[in-house]
Amino acid sequence: MPNRLAGETSPYLLQHAGNPVDWYPWGEEALEKARRENKLVFLSIGYAACHWCHVMEHESFEDESVAAILNQDYVSIKVDREERPDLDEIYMAATMLFSGGHGGWPMSVFLAPDQKPVFAGTYFPKHDAHGRPGFKTVLRFLQQKWQAEQATLVQDAGRVSDALSQMLGERSGDGQFPGADTVERAAAAIYRAFDHSRGGIASGTNKFPQSLSLELLLRAYRAAGQAQYRDVVELTLERICLGGIYDHLGGGLHRYATDPGWLVPHFEKMLYDQALVASVLVDAWQASQDPGKKDLFASRARGICDYVLRDLCSPEGAFYSSEDADSEGQEGKFYIWTRDEIGSALPEADARLFGSHYDVSEHGNWMHPGDAHVPSGPKNVLQVVRSADVLARLDSVPIADVEASLARSRQLLFKLREQRVRPGLDDKVLTGWNGLMITALARVAAVLGQPRYGEAATRAADFALAHIRSGDRLLATYGKGHARLRAYSTDYAFLIEGLLALYEWNGEPRYLLEAESLTDTLIDHYWDSAGDGFFLTAEDHEDLLLRSKTLQDGATPSSNSVMALSLQKLAILLGRTDYREKAGAILRLFVDSSLRAVFQQERLLSALDGWQQGWDEVAIIGPRHDERTRALLAKARAEFRPNMVIVVSEGERIPGTERIPLLAGRGMIEGRPTAYVCRNYVCERPVVEPDELFASS
């Protein structure tokens, strides 16, 4: 019989609805049962694309003997971390306290009935193995401790809760503004941590895209002119674009690489990675002076967007959360190839070129740890090891012929791969992650001149504004035809950022005004009027162990980091000095000038860069269908000026444009599309020729 998760909308929770464990979703029913029966709560937090979450489910949560212990001695709660970042943040911090700084998913947390953590870890095997206690051992030990030493456990849990309050709770700044060299010092520290031969930063053997660090390095390059910052960004992105972490047949990016050379990925695909990497690829395209790298970055940005629109897009135009790493019970099975499979699918000449280009060989370039006795042959993860130019020179044939062969092969193999069993899809729609993707699509549309991506961003934004909110309040998630859960400050921040990017692409004032409305709602319900900054949850959110004020950038940036930039933009676009004051308050509160946690505040430091460097304000007046208007826009958008706002007007009185100071009193000169550029309250003369834009800066 299904358990209580059967009524949920999260695919991750529904995966566990048939477990023999008597799961509860997070809520008062489960917590009240724990209080009434004086039982420990077993809180299991994970997400649908998490490989080790699946492993722990198969080993333990589907096991009748484990379920019997949990059902008798515990109240078991299952949480999707993507739906509940509030719970995930609190109890991940607790897990790291208990484990000496190590965290991850599945997260296994044991709570007293008052929500205070008494013990926490991550994955536990069912039985003791490899120096790790088995899950059954942990369950029996904690139950015995709860029965024999409850007072001690409660006292210790109180100390942990006090520590969590200091880490995540209310915080007030000292009023000091970060020094002028803070961003440069941070960039230098990040640069030193990078692998200067293969790009990226190794975390053990794993390498993540590090999008936020790359953004900051490019900003530091723009501000200080130090080419080594740009160079290490280009190196990293080039290795990502050519490595196995990128899906060379279907587009899109896998979560991270499990080796220093970017070959073997952890095969899950997350929406937020697609968004953040596509956006930084646009930055790198603008900043690069190498035509070959610019072509590569543009190609991969389009490939990421095409993947999302094909495989992660709902019929309504919103974006799903992720695709799993596993299919048919094996990680990566959907994506890997043997040489025989390639040879059978392609003509001999095409197969030879494809194999030489993408590192396909008889002996393979990767063996899954569980494949030692699998008879299907050595596996190949596709990575680019020889360029089309090199292949053309080796075979003394035109490069166009090589590129045509590779394109044919990719198309044929993609169609063949589509016949395989696909990885699982997490089809819930998260407001915040959709906001990140709207930003990326709008930026790719604007900078690379690809309007269909902007049109997709518009559909997603319209869906979120119409269907994932209640009145003036956003909701956090949408699935199975229903929106639910009060939004977090990150949902507001990411969607506001997306609406601003959309406005800069299409010039429709309604998106700017929607961003303003959401910003006012965010301030009303999430701003800490006593100590500044945004809390993660609203003032009318359910009572949790604590109300966190998000401090850290992680795989995605924090709401405070994103809003510190967006508030500066909104202040310029709408002439609202109160927004600029709020941005300054965030920066004074959160930026750690000692840079002890430089890798936890990269986007916040990007906002500080905007504050200290000042902003370019560009207004372009002219009919959108006019090629001269388009030329001015293309020139402005091709520049790497991360602290720039662009407004566009047809020169007509469209409702909403009267709210935009940059358009006031500005029109075309002698009937020709015209660009106006101002910086730090000083305006250059209006220009009508693209080459004259930014001539004095």
Image: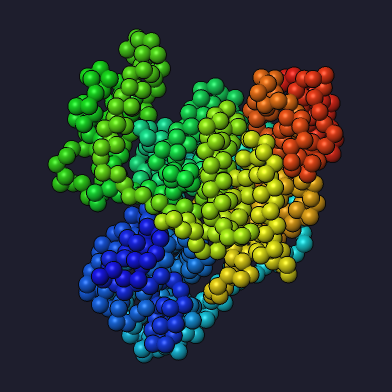
Measuring 54% from the left and 29% from the top, which residue is drawn there? 450
Q: Is residue 552 left or right of residue 519?
A: left
In the rendered image, the vertical position of residue 72 relative to residue 378, given as above or below = below
How did the renderer colour the structure? Answer: rainbow
Front residue (pair 613, 527): 527
Q: Is residue 79 left or right of residue 455?
A: left
Front residue (pair 241, 96): 241
Q: Quadrant of the C terminus?
A: top right
Measuring 58% from the left and 51% from the top, which residue is drawn there? 465
Measuring 43% from the left and 78% from the top, which residue is drawn there? 29
Q: Is residue 364 left or right of residue 662?
A: left
In the rendered image, the vertical position of residue 254 relative to residue 625, given as above or below = below
Measured as percent of width and height from the top left, residue 462 is found at 57, 46
- Residue 111, quarter of picture: bottom left
Counting labels gives: 0
Q: Quadrant of the N terminus?
A: bottom left
In the rendered image, the vertical position of residue 346 relative to residue 187, given as above or below = above
Measured as percent of width and height from the top left, residue 315 is found at 43, 44
Front residue (pair 426, 376): 426
Q: Is residue 625 among what the camera can see? A: yes
Measured as percent of width and height from the top left, residue 678 is found at 80, 34
Measured as percent of width and height from the top left, residue 79 is found at 42, 66
Q: Is residue 440 among what the camera can see? A: no
Measuring 31% from the left and 32% from the top, which residue is drawn there? 414
Front residue (pair 96, 431): 431
